[in-house]
Amino acid sequence: MPKVPAERLLEIGQALFEAAGTARAEAELVMRHIVGANLVGHDSHGVIQIPTYIERIKLGHIVPGAPWTIVQESPTTTVVDGHWGFGYVANERAMRLTIEKARTANLAAATVFRQGHIGRLSSYTQMAAEAGMIGLCTADSGRSPKAVAPFGGREARLGTNPISIAMPSDLLGPLYLDMATSAAAAGKIALAVARNEPVPDGWVIGSDGRPTNDPRQLRQGGALLPLGGPEGGYKGTGLAVMVEILCGLLTGLGFGVEPSGRHNDGCFMAVFNVAAFRPLAEFKKDVGDFIAYLKATPPAEGSTGVLYPGEIEYLRQQQRGRDGIEVEDATWYKLQQLAENYGLSEKLDFTEPE
């Protein structure tokens, strides 16, 4: 697999999206989120997604430059119609507005519907944390094809329905939770397919309902298991149901699958101004002290010690920002093919780095 500097991936992706009809500023924003996912080690939401997004542009499932409309609002709430634009664009703008409302009202929330894939949820909750607030974000895939079987079932009826919460702190790296309510994100299965690797036990079942380590089975009538796997999957299912209601029903997207197969992320976000509860500086210090207390726990056998939520991503970001990002051969080849199709092969040198 080639190891590519982040700046080069940004350049390649931006050029491809512009060639596909995306304005420069929008292409830059989308690629900031995409490469940001690669930098922290969430490769399932990184450049592997570029060919999929461009295909959705061609199908009209993503509309570059789409309008962004407030359907309904109050001083503390907003309902946003993304008109099938890039989810990164629609959702980031919604989070910025929600943060601004929370500055005045101390609490604010928003829903966003009719938008493309929004990627890594912590990209948005960290915006709130950087503003000295607590950010919460949940998402579902509307009525696009499902990937997760509810606990006790063998057919996919739920999305991976992720949840993210971020906290302001005095730590060197950001402190946040970002997790799917399934055993793994669907993008991780796609990544395993691209890398020709098996998946761990407890992630996937085949169309016959039996456990499998073959990631290809997911797209052959199989399903992801909920968080907790065969034994504790009722917990993941419970969380997924709540996310589906917040992001599918509260937004009006609905549930189930529509024939078009159009990917349609619904999102619920909320922001809480820490200063409305106690002085921000004191809170940030206490969070840092609490994490120090946890990290002082003697390590378990075979462990190098306790990491706080978001720490491993912070460490990866430092390492990958310095050494480059590994891109699986299958994805690198697809990017080359797209560049060739758009006549960008000479401009975008795909010579593998030494």
Image: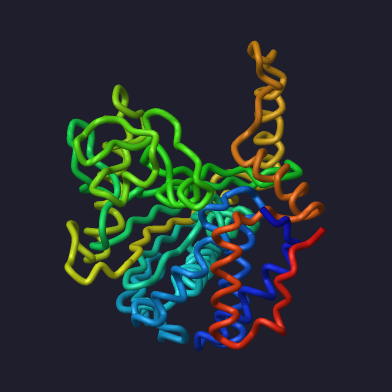
Q: Is residue 215 left or right of residue 337?
A: left
Residue visible at 55% across and 59% down in the picture: 330
Q: Is residue 145 left or right of residue 190?
A: left
* Vertical placement of residue 142 versus 157, above or below: below
* Vertical placement of residue 35 versus 56, above or below: above
Residue visible at 49% across and 55% down in the picture: 121
Residue visible at 46% across and 84% down in the picture: 64
Coloring scheme used: rainbow
Q: Position of residue 13 (x, y in %)?
A: 61, 73
Q: Quadrant of residue 67?
A: bottom left
Q: Where is residue 24 in the image (x, y as percent from the top left)?
A: 61, 86
Q: Position of residue 110 (x, y in %)?
A: 39, 64
Q: Quadrant of residue 36?
A: bottom right
Residue 334 or residue 118, whichever sits in front: 334
Residue visible at 74% across and 63% down in the picture: 352
Residue 264 or residue 259, whichever sits in front: 259
Q: In this view, does 34 lie to the left or right of 209?
A: right
State the count of labels: 0
| Residue 212 in view (yes/no) | yes
Residue 59 or residue 277, whichever sits in front: 59
The quarter of the image holding the C terminus is bottom right
Residue 112 or residue 183, whichever sits in front: 183
| Residue 136 in view (yes/no) | no
Q: Where is residue 2 in the image (x, y as percent from the top left)?
A: 70, 57
